[in-house]
Amino acid sequence: MSITFDAIYLDFDAKLRRFIRGRVSDAATAEDILQDVYLRIHTHSDDLRQSDRLESWVYQITRNAITDFYRRARPQADLPEFLPAPEAEGDGAMQALAQSIQGMLDCLPEPYRQALILTDIQGMPQVELAAQLGLSVSGAKSRVQRARLKLKEAFLDCCHFEFDRRGMVIDYHPKCAQCATQHPCAPPQEC
């Protein structure tokens, strides 16, 4: 390239000083940033392909150097070594629901109950479930999805749920007194 570092320095030194001083209040800091800019220009001068874009290239390097300065200057808060676990909003509701899941699972037809227990509770991959039950993989996936849907319907038949913004259950209420006390397998009654 025909443009030398000395030529860039002579053409841009005063302009860059004003540009940086307009964005940084401390003169010593502005000088440090200018030196960083010159170092970057010298290091990356081979990257400039078109000399007619020299000015925009030099100012982009300068803007990046100023941005990097402010990033480094941003105060970093020290994090404590151990953070307490966040308290879940609906822990009580989730614990009560967790206790009733077994009763709801017992009410599902055997093929659906078995599919849910093996995949969702014991963590078996659906591919292994398919092999164990002699189903195709898509058949096993369908069975698990239908089982989840039946379990969801059983819960929705007996309770009204409140969810947080992430979809987590924060509270629930039985639809009626009978729903709160009846066996989970009993057919839902009109409340």
Image (spheres, rainbow, N blue to C red):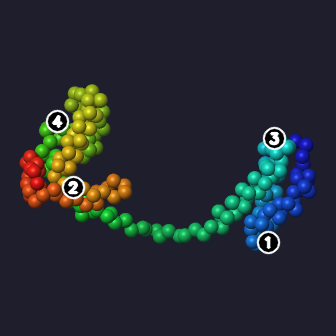
Q: Specify the quadrant of the image occupied by residue 124.
A: top left
Q: In the drawing, does residue 161 fall left or right of residue 56?
A: left
Q: How crowded is mark 2: few (under 14 residues within 10 Å), some or many (20 or more)?
A: few
Q: Are marks 2 and 3 in contact (CB under 8 Å)?
A: no
Residue type indicated by callout 1: Ala
Q: Are marks 1 and 2 in contact (CB under 8 Å)?
A: no
Q: Nearer the viewer, mark 2 or mark 3?
A: 2
Q: In the drawing, does residue 90 fall left or right of residue 12?
A: left
Spot occupied by residue 135 in the image (x, y as percentages of width and height): 24, 28
Q: Is mark 3 on a helix, strand or loop?
A: loop
Q: In the drawing, does residue 152 fall left or right of residue 168?
A: left
Q: Is mark 2 on a helix, strand or loop?
A: strand
- Comes first in the chain, label 2 or label 3: 3
Q: How crowded is mark 4: few (under 14 residues within 10 Å), some or many (20 or more)?
A: few
- Comes first in the chain, label 3 or label 1: 1
Q: Distance between the residues labelled 4 and 2?
A: 27 Å
Q: How far apart are marks 1 and 2 (CA)?
A: 65 Å
Q: How far apart are marks 1 and 4 (CA)?
A: 76 Å
User: Can you say whether 54 is above or below 97 in the image?
Assistant: above
Q: In the drawing, does residue 139 fall left or right of residue 16?
A: left
Which residue in the protein does label 3 denote?
49
Badge number at residue 111: 4
Badge number at residue 27: 1
- Comes first in the chain, label 3 or label 4: 3
Residue type indicated by callout 3: Arg
Which residue in the protein does label 2 denote?
160
